[in-house]
Amino acid sequence: MIKEIDLAKLIAEMDDKLMEEGCPPSERPFVAYMRLKQRWKPHDMCTFQNDSMYIAIEYFYERLYRPSNLQVKPVHLGAFMFRDVFFPLRISRVYGAKRTINPISLLGDISETQKQWLLADKQTVLTFYDQVIDLMDFSCGLEDLAGGESLSKETLEFWDLAKRQLEAAAAMVLGTFDKDPVIQNCCLSIELLLKGALAAQGISKEMLKDQKQGYGHNLKNLANKTAEFLPNFDGETVLFVIQQLPDYVSSRYEAEQISQLELGRFLMYAQFVSGEVLRQFSDRNSRAHLTTGSGHDWDLTCRIFPRKTD
């Protein structure tokens, strides 16, 4: 049996090696366990959750790193605004034929009192559920499509860039730095989402970028054209969203007096558009399916993410 002091030394040495290899901290406990097990207990059939070695390794890592360092990277990091406070909204992968999740568990940095406060207001809960579903449909749908050949390289590039803009906007509202660039992030993400949808219909990148003969930065024209091609696309709501945003071009050069509440709405509008666009191309459509468990849990059947509708 490995002594505690020897195991600590082995873990520290293994951690140095994994760091040099570029393995992120969140993955190191399991990778370290698999390598050490191969060395010390290669024939042991015990599952890692019940293996005393894994429990010990996990314990040491919890002492070496902060909980945030060991948290598995989400598929997408968004943000949800409750009142005028922003909380990280971490969208994780869901595997298996059926899983039950509590959407509120996806919110980070929120106290139990704040959870109860949020869940006590029906409209806030519905808005929150909408945001969770939209980001699930977007981020998980994008992962599904990225591995296939049904869409053009240009379409996937547009959507990948949109994802980066959305996550950048979330990082800004969650941080303590200047939040004004969030406006541009939101406008640009919507532009990229719509251009990706139109690129999937065969419209060239040159035409989409052209300011005079094509679409340029005209979000309204992009939304209208997208609605022409996609009959199930909620063009009316997307146009409403676009009309709420500051002028895309002029906001680059003029300081905007935008409140925290308005910034939060802009980001959540953009997160809605991300889900609405990807729903037209993937088999993820949370708005069409719903099964609920007890309390605020959802049953996720197959790969369809449910939505609370009333």
Image (cartoon, helix red, strand yellow):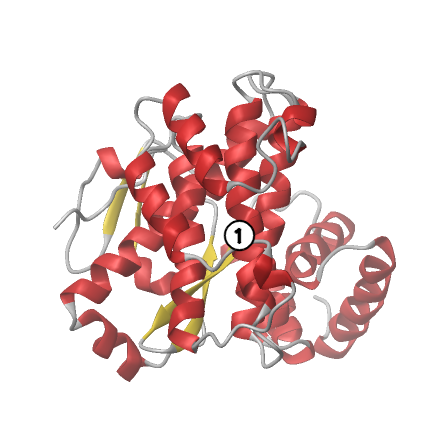
Answer left or right for 103 relative to 121. right
- The image quarter containing residue 264 is bottom left
Answer left or right for 151 relative to 281. right
Quadrant of the frame with the N terminus: bottom right
Q: Visible in this render: residue 57? A: yes
Answer left or right for 135 relative to 20. left
- What residue do we see at 64% from left, 25% from top? 207
Q: Nearest the camera: 54 or 121?
A: 121
For the residue carrying disc 1, how many other residues have a C-alpha within 10 Å: few (<14), some (14-19), or many (20+)? many
Q: Nearest the camera: 194 or 48?
A: 194
Residue placed furthest toward the left: 310
- What residue do we see at 20% from left, 70% from top? 119
Q: Visible in this render: residue 102? A: no
Label 1 sits on residue:
187
Picture coordinates of residue 195, whole percent (x, y): 56, 33
- What residue do we see at 23% from left, 55% from top? 297
- What residue do we see at 63% from left, 62% from top? 252
Callout count = 1
Picture coordinates of residue 122, whole percent (x, y): 14, 65
SS label for mark 1: helix
Q: Amino acid at mark 1?
A: Cys
Picture coordinates of residue 244, whole percent (x, y): 37, 57
Residue placed furthest toward the front: 212
Picture coordinates of residue 153, whole percent (x, y): 67, 24
